[in-house]
Structure formats: C-alpha cells, structure tokens
Amino acid sequence: MNGPIGAGAVHAALACAAFGAVCGFVGGRRRSMDAWRLARGATYASFAAMSLAILTMVRALLTHDFSVWYVSRVGSLETPPFYTVISLWSSLEGSILLWGWILTVYAAALAFVYRRRHADYMPYTLGVLLSVSAFFTWLIAGPADPFEPVFPVPSNGPGPNPLLQNHPLMALHPPMLYAGYVGMAVPFAIASGALLRGRIGTAWLRPLRLWALIPWTFLTVGIVAGGWWSYEVLGWGGYWAWDPVENASFLPWLSATAFIHSLMVQERRGILKTWSLSLLMVTFLLTILGTFMTRSGVFNSVHSFSQSSIGPIFLAFLGVALFWCAGLLATRSELIASDGALPGPASREGAFLLNNVVFLAFTLTVLLGTVYPLLAEAIRGVRVSVGLPYFNRMGVPLGLAVLSLMGVGPALPWGRSDAARIRAQLLWPGLFGIAVACGCVAFGVVQPLPLLTFGLAGFVTFVTLREFWVPTRSRMSSSGAGALESLFHVVSRARRRYGGYVVHLGVVAMIVAITASWNYKLKVEATLDRGGSFRIGDYDVTFRDVRPVEESHRFSVVATLDVARDGEPVAVLQPRSNHYKIMGQFQREPIGTPAVHSTAAGDVYLTLLAFEKDGSQATIQGLWQPLVPWIWWSAGLMVLGSFVAMWPERRRRGRARGGVDGEAHAPRAEPAPPPGQAGAAAAEAAR
Amino acid sequence: MKWGYVVGAAALGLPFLALLASGFGKDPSAIVSPLPGHEAPDFTLSDLDGKAVRLSELRGAPVVINFWATWCIPCRQEHEVLARGAAHHAADGVQFLGVVYQDEPESIRRFLARSPVDYPTLVDVKGQTAIDYGVTGVPETFFVRPDGVIDSKKVGPLDPQDLERRLGPLLATGGGS
C-alpha cells in the first residue's frame, strides 16, 4: 500500500501547491485577505501531504517494501535500519522527495510566521515560493517518481551506494545541504514578492535578512559536514577537492555571503539596492544550477550518483528562473534606485563593496573552473579539466583578500573619514599581525604564503576582538558590572553586528586550520609486521594485528594499531577496509574507513592500504594533519555567530539610548525596527 | 523599464544554458583512448587449458578483444551478448577473445561451466596486456580491423546493437572470408 499512499500524497501536495500559488498571486494583486488566507491554508495542506509522502517512503524503506521503485533501487534486507532510513537521500528520487518536503516546511513556516505581518507583499512571496514548490512536487509526481510500482516485486535490493552507508555523517551532510539550497528560495521569494508589490520601503529587508541567514547557516554546516564526511570516509586525508558538486554547494554560499554583506549597506545607507537584489537572485539561480550539476550527469563527480533524464527539465527551470529575475529587475528598476552615493573607498561602505567584488570574483572563478571541461569540449573539441592547481592558484589570493577585508572593513568607520583616523584604527592590529608573523618565523614557518595568512589572521583577530573589548570596557567602567555581564550586554544590544564578528572569528580559525593542514601535513607509508612501528610527528604507531569482521551488510578487514606519544599510549586506532554486499555478493573493490585520533594540535590519521590474509602484515598509511579539527570546530563558531545574529531583537520601548553603552563605539550599528513593519501589522489588524 | 537586464540575461544566460546543454548525452567520465587508429599491441596469452594464442597470428580477420572478470557484474550482463555475437559472426570469420582481468582461474572455470562461450578465454596473469591496452576497468572491449589496427574501443557493457554497429566497419574492410 505504500506506493499508492505515497503517490497520492505527492499528487495532493502538488494540487495544494499549485492552488496556493494561484491564491497567493491573486491575493497579492487584488489585495484580497480571503485569497491570502486560502494561500496559507493550501501551504499548510501541501506541507501535510508532503510529510505523509516522506513518512510513507521511510516506512516503505524500513519494511523493505520492494514493490516501491525507490526501495527496490536503494533498499536491501542486509542494510542496518539507520542506513536504511538515511538511504532516503542516497539517490536521485529520494533526494528530490526530501528536497520537496523541505521546501514545504519553509513555505509553511513562512506562512505561519507572517500570518499577521507584512501582509502587503507576503501573498506574492508565498505565490512565488509555492510555484517553486509546485515545480519540485511535479518532478516527484512525474519524471522522478520514487513511488512507481515495481512488478514483479523483487525479493531483495542492492542497498544504498556503499560510500553512503560507510559513515553516520551521511545522516547530517545531505539534509543540511538541502536545507541550505532549498532555503535560498525563501529570500528569493521575499524579494520577488516585494518587487511585485511595488512600493517597497524598507520593511521587507528584515525578513529578507533573517531568511537568508537561515539557509546560509544550513549551507555552511552542510558544506563543512561534507568535507568532514570525505575526510572520515574516503581515506585520502583530504576534505575538499574542488569536485564539481562541492563547487556547486560552494557557489551559492559565496554569493549568499556577498548578499548578506551588501544587504547591510542597503539597510543602513539605502544604496547598493540593485546590486544586493542581483546577488540574491544569482544565489537562487546558483542553487538550481547546483542541483543541475549534481543530478544531470553532465559533470564528472564522485557525487553524481545517478545519471538521469531530469537534466533538461532542470535546465529549462533554470532558464525560466533567469528570465523571471531579469524581468523583475527590468520592470521594477525605479523601485530599487539608490538613495545616495558611495561615500568613498576608505569607508565601511567601500570595504563592503570591495568584499562583494572579491566574493563575486571568487564565485566566477569557481564557476569557470567547474564548467571549463564543457567549455573546452565545446570550443576545442577536447575534454580537459582544470583541477586542483587552477583552483588553488586562484582561490588562495582570493581567500587572502577576503581575510584582509574581514580586518580592514570593521576597522573603517561608516561614511567619510580622514586618513589620520584610519591610520589610528589600523596601527595596532597591523603591528599585532606583524608580531604574529614574526612569532611564526620563530616557530619555523618560513614559506611566504602561510606567513602572510597567519599574519593577516592575527590582524583580523585583533580588529575583531577590539570590537568586543572597547565597548565592553566602557560598559564596565560606566556601570561597574563585571566583564562577562558587560560583554553580554554589549552583544545583546547589537546582536547582528556581534554575531557577524563571531562568524568572522570562525572563518579566521578555518582559514588558519586549512593553511596549516595543507602546508604542514606529514605522510608515512609503511609495511609492518606484528609489533612493528613507525613514527609520524610526535607519535609512534605500532601494528598489533589485522583480522576479519563480518556484519550483515558488509565484510571488513580491521587493523588494530597502538598510538603512543612519548612512550605513553594515547589511542588504539582501527582503520578498516570494507566490502559491502550488493545483491548477495560482496563487492570486490573495498571502501576504506580511516581511523583518526584527534587533538587540538591535529589528527593522527591512519589508513589500511594492504594486508596479508594470515594477519601477519599490514601496509598502513599514516598522516599527521595539523589543526584539522579546528576546521570542524570553526564551523560551530560560525553557526553560533549566525544564531546570535538571527536571534530576535528585544523590543525597545522608546528608551533613550545611553551615551556610553554597547553602541558608543559604533553608533547606529543597529537601525531601529523600520516603521513599515509595525505599520503593516497594524494595518492588517485594523482590517 | 530597463530592458538592459533582460538583454544582459539573454546575452550571458542563453550561451551558458546552451553550454550546459552541450553536455547532455555524453559521458563526462569517459577517458579518451589514444589507441584507435593505431596498431593493436601484440600479445601471447594462454587460455585456461594452457594453449597459447598470439594476436598477430590472427591478422587478416577482424578481432574483438573483451577484457572482463567474473567479479564484475556488468561483465556478467555483457557475457550473453558476446556469446551470441561470437556464434552469429563465426561465419564472417570474426575472432572473439576474452581476456580475464585480475581473476582466479578457478572462478573463471566455474563461471564458464555455467555460461560457456565458443571463443578462447585468455588469462592475463601479470596484467601486462591490460596495461598495454590502457584498461582502466572492466568491461572494456577493443575492435581490431583485419589489418591489425584498432578501430574502436568500448568502455562498459556492450549491448547487441552496439556490438553490431562496431562490427560493421570491421566486416566492410574485407574481413569476411
């Protein structure tokens, strides 16, 4: 029964989304509250139907209902329940089902949160969002139908792709990435709604920012979790390879980051409006492009697990979305004309714009590198891919530019400024950065690029921490409160700004960790007899034994090694080599699982390369990966920063701002809630 | 109304979309082999009974060299296509050769006992022939013209239509006897 129930639910969701989209557009155009209410109701119904569909699929997977096409493709009796559930997103159709469901979650959340606010443009917004939702639901109902019946019903299936059942991080990485990808449709819909409505004011910028930050955070987690998964599973010790599908997730992240920054300038100064909106639309288009890259089979990638016929459909959708964006900007250009001019390059605004240029250059660089194989084949008739050297050569200077701007931007005041003040702002951070670089030289770092990176990191850290410290200190001296209490007060008065700074600290930590792990990695490969050992970094690794382990879904060879530091045992590591069962037969090509001992200084990373069948000997690759754990931890810092920035502002009840509080250092860091927002709510309440 | 945006989107977007569309129907992971158009590397390999087969001695007839293994699921799917193809084209003088890649003679024997073929199955003990032919995985199949020059190479399992299509030019160059 799972098949018909699931298919029925998907069709119901499609009908609701299509009906809701029409109601949304009608409600927006005629300013009809009835239509707006119907649109919201249809949104909730579509969410409920898609939830039923996805639960039905989970049930079909768990009960091994091989009469459902998707289960017959990715299910197997041997796969453990955990991996059976997450095989929901191990292949195309399930991924799109999850994708469509997440979109209805966003739509329902948006309809609920703004049921009484922003009623002037929200119906349009919901109309746009439900149109996108209807497209995805249609894909699930037709071209990528996971519920299609299978006859004759097979008795077992192949199970999910072995790579995807090799690590629990698979439970985190794709859903986070999808939540990020799909979520970018929401700010796109908000902007489309506001532009369709016409008279826009500034009220819509707050929801826009919030709903851009939410998917941005998911995307950040998704990308880092993907790197982590690759590090923990693929066994080559790397976490990023500039693979087309990795790039596909990085592209919208870059443009969304640029958008979040330019939106701040727009909110504060009323400039860069067209620019910001274009960045937002580019971000949305890049998420669709990313889906295309992953699923069309046009790009060569470890991630393109299925070649499918939906490529042309996505390409058509991308084209429609592109012209929708261009049409909106064209017909509404007078609404988004700037209120003023840029005050000059040596200002916070100038730094923001430069940041945008760098991010956009980064986006184009990655995009060019990704589509280069297609371009070369179209023009020269040969297939060449640019690979790692291109991305590293281009990415390193752009990354360094981003790093520098994270220091220079916050140090510059808003508006025009004189050279003396800028010098004063940059002097101490600059000196600190130079001191950090000198300190690194003392520790033996001599290559220019790492030195430059570490020095710049010191510079940025100084600037950022000073932004916390100066107002905290003045709060302490004015109120007599303790340091932590004052810091809390300062941050809670300007959450968006300080949240942003916390994210910056996370990015600095990540760039430092990436630089260290790239430049100071150590590698040893040794064939060891029992009791034999090798040394890597400060660690001694001793081979104990290697033995087979059989589980229901795989057969593994597990090596056991003792890791000691200065003679003290610190860990027992078990790198393994797994053969997964496909259609009752173990696959021949093994999938390794490296074993990692993590410390704050870095990871000892062991991979089993080869072994003697009698267990007497094993070939082990040992890597010392300095600072790698900081990459994952810094993502935590970035998420924390986004939460601080997203947390709703406390309502200030007309209280005069004290002269010496958190805002004293940078007055007007947070604009008061725009009057339009309260006005819209009152207007609706009055109706 | 600023038409510039629409014109810009069309000028930049349409070529980009066309570029993406140009990738449809192609295999992005295909590795271009330099071998077609060149003489097939010669080899002397023994079959399961120890009887030696030398490629250059088959000159004058079209040869189909199929690299395969029993552990390879697509090879098993393709096996039937090759067996029928070899039987069908035996009258045309086409010589099929199976070269077993990284496999145990015991499992080959077991497999062939169940699904026999009428052409020699050669064992590439050290994998040297696979290296000479630049084999990156199995199945891979090479189509050699009667003059000993490789006509085409197929990566992945053959289907009957593909086999016929690739045999066509070999037979046309006077391979039939």
Image (tube, coloured by chain):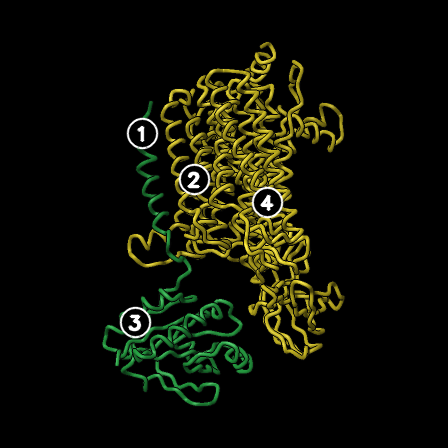
Chain colours: A yellow, B green
Q: Where, by quadrant of the figure, is residue A320 drawn?
A: top left
Q: CA distance from mark 2 to mark 1?
A: 20 Å
Q: Are marks 1 and 3 on the same chain?
A: yes
Q: Are marks 3 and 2 on the same chain?
A: no
Question: Which residue is at 29% across, 57% downward?
Answer: A381
SS category of the residue bearing label 3: strand
Q: Which residue is mark 3?
A: B151
Q: Nearer the viewer, mark 1 or mark 3?
A: 3
Question: Which residue is at 51% across, 15% downward?
Answer: A32
Q: Which residue is mark 2?
A: A360
Q: CA distance from mark 4 to mark 3?
A: 47 Å
Left or right? Give the position of A259 relative to A59: left
Q: Earlier in the sequence, mark 1 or mark 3?
A: 1
Q: Contact (CB < 8 A) between labels 4 and 2?
A: no
Q: Are marks 4 and 2 on the same chain?
A: yes
Q: CA distance from mark 4 to mark 1?
A: 38 Å
Residue B139, percent from left and from top: 44, 70
Q: Are marks 4 and 3 on the same chain?
A: no
